[in-house]
């Protein structure tokens, strides 16, 4: 969707055009769902929070135009706040086992050489969720959503340089954390061992 | 400038292949769109029928004047009897 076109759709949506809001919804629902899914770890809460994000956006879109950020950034910020509240409210809740929530394409879409086991995936997600909130957000936006550092910067309210720096530090932390628990691909650990010699 | 080691790049690739987008349930997407886009049904009160309104007003006036005339008649009769 060209940016100008999105401007026109946003203008319509902010004036109460429900069809215009529907177009925005269709454009962003998958991305917001993915973000929340990886932050919560289960489809049930991801659906519930995704619905809340869009209802909140629907109710406040009239005020959106004065905020000076892209619509996607605004949606991610709403999602980020709702996920933070969700974690706070559920801090005592037991984590949902991830085996049932591993996306199916991990099992069927990838070449055999790239397949990772559910257990590895579970450990990886577990480690990611132990990162600070902004680092989790960065990793998900970078790898799941495929956004650039500049786009991530707009969403997170940071400069591109700050994102780049945080990204590098996060990668190192995550890699070292996984290395300690030995939850990385065999070829990767082999190279690390050689490097450490 | 940060120079990434081979293993860090490899780790990046590992994350790239592991953390892939998932598709939300199509039924959920459709249902939520319907809830957002289709406006709630508004029930308007039926407008009253003007003929019925006139008939009701006429009946009310008839009862009012009828009562008034009856009252006055009874009062006159009372005065005539107990004069």
Image: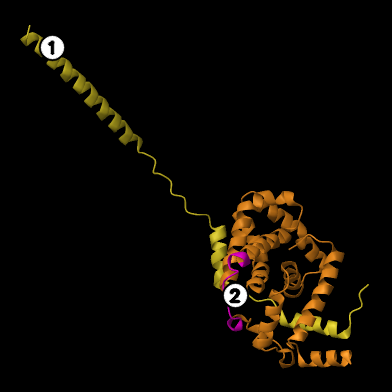
Chain colours: A orange, B yellow
Query: Between residues A70 and A80, which one lies in front from this camera angle?
Result: A80
| Quadrant of the snapshot with the C terminus of chain A | bottom right
The answer to whether the residues at label 2 and label 1 have Cβ atoms under 8 Å apart is no
Q: Tell me the element at label 1.
A: helix
Can you give x and y, in whole percent of width and height, for residue A128 in the image?
Answer: 71, 76
Q: Residue sitting at 59 percent across and 58 percent down?
A: A55
- Looking at the image, which residue sits at the far left? B81
Which stretch appears magenta?
A87-100
- The residue shown at (72%, 50%) is A65
Residue found at the very far right of the displayed protein = B1
The vertical placement of A173 against B7, above or below, is above
Q: Is residue B13 left or right of residue B32?
A: right
Q: Residues within 10 Å of mark 2 (few under 14, many from 20)?
A: some
Is residue A115 positioned above or below B80 on the image?
Answer: below
Q: Which residue is drawn at 57% across and 59% down?
A: B36
Marked residue chain, label 2: A
Image position, residue A150 (x, y; %): 83, 65
Total labels: the figure holds: 2
Q: Can residue A178 be seen in this view?
A: yes
Residue A1 falls in image quadrant: bottom right
Chain ID for label 1? B
Q: Name the residue under label 2.
A: A42
Q: Residue B1 carries which label?
A: none
Foreground mark, 2 or 1, reads 2
| Front-lying residue, B78 or B73 | B78
Q: Quadrant of residue B11?
A: bottom right
- Majority secondary structure of magenta residues: loop
Q: Where is residue B28 in the image (x, y as percent from the top left)?
A: 55, 70
* Disc 2 to disc 1, C-alpha distance: 89 Å
Q: Mark 1 points at which residue?
A: B76
Mark 1: few, some, or many residues within 10 Å (few <14, many ≥20)? few
Magenta segment includes A113:
no
């Amino acid at each position: 969707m060209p940016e100008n076109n999105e401007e026109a759709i946003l203008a319509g949506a902010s004036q109460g055009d429900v069809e215009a809001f529907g177009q925005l919804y269709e454009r962003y629902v998958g991305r917001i769902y993915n973000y929340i899914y990886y932050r919560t770890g289960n489809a049930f809460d991801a659906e519930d929070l995704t619905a809340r994000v869009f209802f909140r956006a629907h109710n406040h879109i009239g005020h959106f135009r004065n905020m000076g950020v892209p619509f996607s950034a605004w949606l991610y910020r709403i999602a980020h706040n709702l996920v933070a509240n969700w974690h706070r409210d559920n801090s005592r809740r037991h984590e949902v086992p991830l085996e049932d929530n591993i996306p199916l394409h991990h099992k069927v879409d990838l070449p055999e050489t790239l397949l990772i086991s559910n257990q590895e995936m579970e450990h990886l997600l577990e480690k990611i969720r132990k990162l600070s909130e902004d680092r989790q957000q960065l990793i998900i936006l970078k790898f799941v959503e495929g956004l650039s550092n500049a786009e991530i910067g707009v969403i997170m309210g940071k400069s591109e340089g700050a994102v780049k720096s945080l990204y590098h530090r996060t990668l190192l932390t995550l890699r070292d954390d996984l290395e300690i628990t030995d939850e990385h691909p065999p070829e990767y650990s082999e190279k690390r061992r050689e490097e450490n010699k | 400038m940060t120079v990434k080691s081979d293993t860090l790049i490899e780790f990046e690739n590992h994350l790239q292949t592991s953390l892939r987008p998932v598709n939300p349930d199509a039924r959920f997407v459709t249902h939520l769109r319907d809830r957002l886009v289709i406006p709630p049904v508004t029930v308007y009160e039926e407008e009253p029928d003007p003929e019925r309104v006139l008939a009701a007003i006429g009946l009310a006036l008839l009862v009012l004047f009828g009562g008034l005339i009856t009252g006055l008649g009874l009062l006159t009769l009372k005065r005539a009897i107990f004069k």
